[in-house]
Every structure is written in C-alpha cells, then in structure tokens.
Image (cartoon, helix red, strand yellow):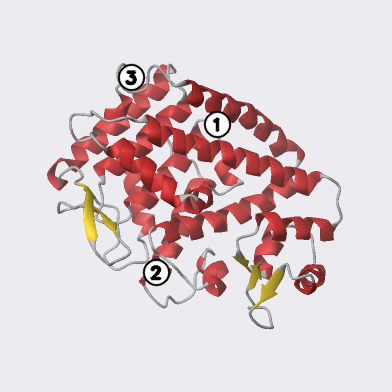
Amino acid sequence: MRSLQRDTKLDPVPGVIVATLRAIDLAAGAEARYVDQLPQLLEGLREQARVESITASSAIEGVLVDHIRVPALASSNPPQFRNRSEKEFAGYSAALDSLQQQDPGALSIGAILHLHRLLFSFVDGGGGRFKLDDNLVVNRHEDGTTSTRFEPIPAAETEYYVAELVDRTNDALAAGVLHPMLITAAFGLDLLCIHPFADGNGRVARLMTTYLMNRTGYGVGRYVSLEQLIYETKDDYYIALGRSTTGWFDDGAHDVWPWAHYFLGCVAQGYVRFADRIAAGANGGTKQDRIREFVLFHAPATFSISDIRRAVPGVSDQTIRLVLTELKVAGRVTVDGPGRGATWKRL
C-alpha cells in the first residue's frame, strides 16, 4: 500500500538491492533445473524445510513446543494437544501445507483470512477475521518492561487498508514494472504495519510472503526455510522493521529500503543454502557422508534421528546411528538419552 507508491518509494532502486536481485534471479533459474533432475533429493529438502519453517516461524513469536513432539504436531493428524502453543504450532503446519499443496489463486482478502483461519484452526474461537479492537506493537525488554514500537491502523479502518494493499499489490504485479521480489518485500512490510489481526500478524505475513514468492516463480522457500534464516537473524529482523516502519503512519513518510535489504538478503542466503544442500546431496558421496554433512552443517542445533531421516532420504536408521556414534566419540555431538525419542545436540 504505502510502500507501493512507486514514484516515492521503490524508484530508484539502490545499487546494493539491484545486485541482490540479480543474484536471486540467477539462483532461481538453477532452481527450476533441479526440479526435473533431482526429484528425490528435493523431496527430502522439502520436508526438512517444512518442519524448520513451522518451528522457526512459531518460535519467533514465542510459540515453543517440546522438540520430541514436533514430528507429530507437524503431521496431518496431530495428537491430543497439551497446551495452546501446541495448537498454534499445529495450526501453522496446516496453513503452510495449504500453501504448498494447492494454489490459493490470486492475492485476495479471502486468501489472507483463510491462512489466518488455518493458523488458529485448533484454538477455541479460531481465526479468519480482522481485529475487533485497536492494538499496539510493543517491545519487551529483558528487565520485564515494555515500550510501544508503533500503533497500527485502527480496527475500524483495517479492512479498507488491507483491501487497498491487495489491490495495489495485484496492480503492481500485473504492470510488470517493478521486480516481483520488491513487490513482495513491500507487501510484507505494509501488512505488518497494518497489523490486521489481534494475534498472528507476523506468522501470516511470513506465510503470505511464501505465497507471493511461489506465485512469482521464486520457490526456494519450499526447499530452504526462510523462516529459519529470519529466526537465526531475528535481531536484525526487528531492527530492519523498526527502521522501515518509522514514518509509515505519517502518510507513508518512511524508508522501505532497510526492510527490503534485510528481506532480500535472507532470500539470497536461502538460495546459497539451497545450492549447498543440492551439492551435498548430489556429489556422489556415500550415505554416511551425506548424514555427516547434514548433521555438522545443516541440521538445527538440536535435532532428532527423524530430522535426519527426512533430510537424507534413502538411509537406514542403523546407518544414521552409526554416524551419530562416530560423531559422539569425536566430541562433535551429544545426546540426552537412549531410545527413539532421544534428542541430539551439535557441539
């Protein structure tokens, strides 16, 4: 909306942004080739990225669940929930799967509300509606105090602002003048500033970013978790948002480029990580080499055998345990106990 005022916001494009966009476009071309050449490897990467995305996007908002429960909660048939966090975790899984399994069609208010409804589909009262009361976006400090980061659009004006954002985004994509990744960055920033929901705004914004990237031919989020990259750099995430939201409410007197620089940098890094994982999986190394590569360089800091199984298709649990034992003896990993439910940690 306010970031899609082309004459004042997205033109001219800074040189560093142009270079990042060029790198993203080159990497996206390689992505298309891998889809046909390495389907089995990509399927393993897809499942790994899916679980990482659900876990990281939830964790950014303070929604944390027991690591042992992650596979079941991220499945299509989650178990009985222990708390609200597990309900929201499973809801993010449902929303992300909806995006990955079927094209929701052109960008619309209905698509945004549908994802919000799925996000809170296991929570009493559910989602799928805009906020009824005005809200604040606050910073929570280590000493327990809070401060107001910004005051979003009032509840009474929310639907109007979201409708205008949807229209401007669709018009910009149809015009073909601006790079689609710039439009995606601007959309995400504006949706976060509008803050249309009582809860779940950050998660819906990240889901909608995935949606727009998929529709415009940038599908790296299917194979590498951009949410995980954001989680790993969440201090920079909040700093960039803070810089670009300043002035947004003064009739769009803000600077979109700090946010665009951060967001596009994450996408470019996602493609680098994608290329690394493709190389690791397709270089002809042994199954043990592939397991070792994943554990040491790509697995979360805390992981399970099921994480390895999803990320390295076609290997047996016996081979996985053999490599983990070797790495444990070498002091590279540690384990919290015996059995299938054991949690491993990279040192």
Tell me which label, 2 or 1, sits earlier in the chain: 2
Camera-near label (2 vs 1) is: 2
- What residue is drawn where x is 66% and y is 35%? 31
Side of 292 relative to 145 (left or right): right
Residue 16 at what x, y percent from top left?
50, 25
Task: Locate the C terminus and report the quarter of the image it occupies.
Answer: bottom right
Label 2–label 3 contact, CB within 8 A = no
- What residue is drawn where x is 39% and y is 34%? 258
Name the residue type under label 2: Ser
For disc 2, the marked residue is 85
Name the residue type under label 1: Gly
- What residue is drawn where x is 51% and y is 45%? 102
Of the numbered discs in the image, which one, if any, rests on residue 120? Answer: none
Of the numbered discs in the image, which one, if any, rests on residue 217? Answer: 1
Residue 5 at what x, y percent from top left?
29, 22
Toward which corner of the image does residue 275 lie, by quadrant? top right
Q: In the picture shown, does residue 91 fall above or below 202?
A: below
For disc 3, the marked residue is 6
Side of 139 relative to 300 (left or right): left
Direction front: furthest residue: 143
- What residue is drawn where x is 73% and y is 44%? 278
In space, the residues marked 2 and 3 are separated at their CA atoms by 40 Å
Q: Residues within 10 Å of mark 2 (few under 14, many from 20)?
A: some
In space, the residues marked 2 and 1 are separated at their CA atoms by 33 Å
Camera-near label (2 vs 3) is: 3
Side of 284 relative to 199 (left or right): right
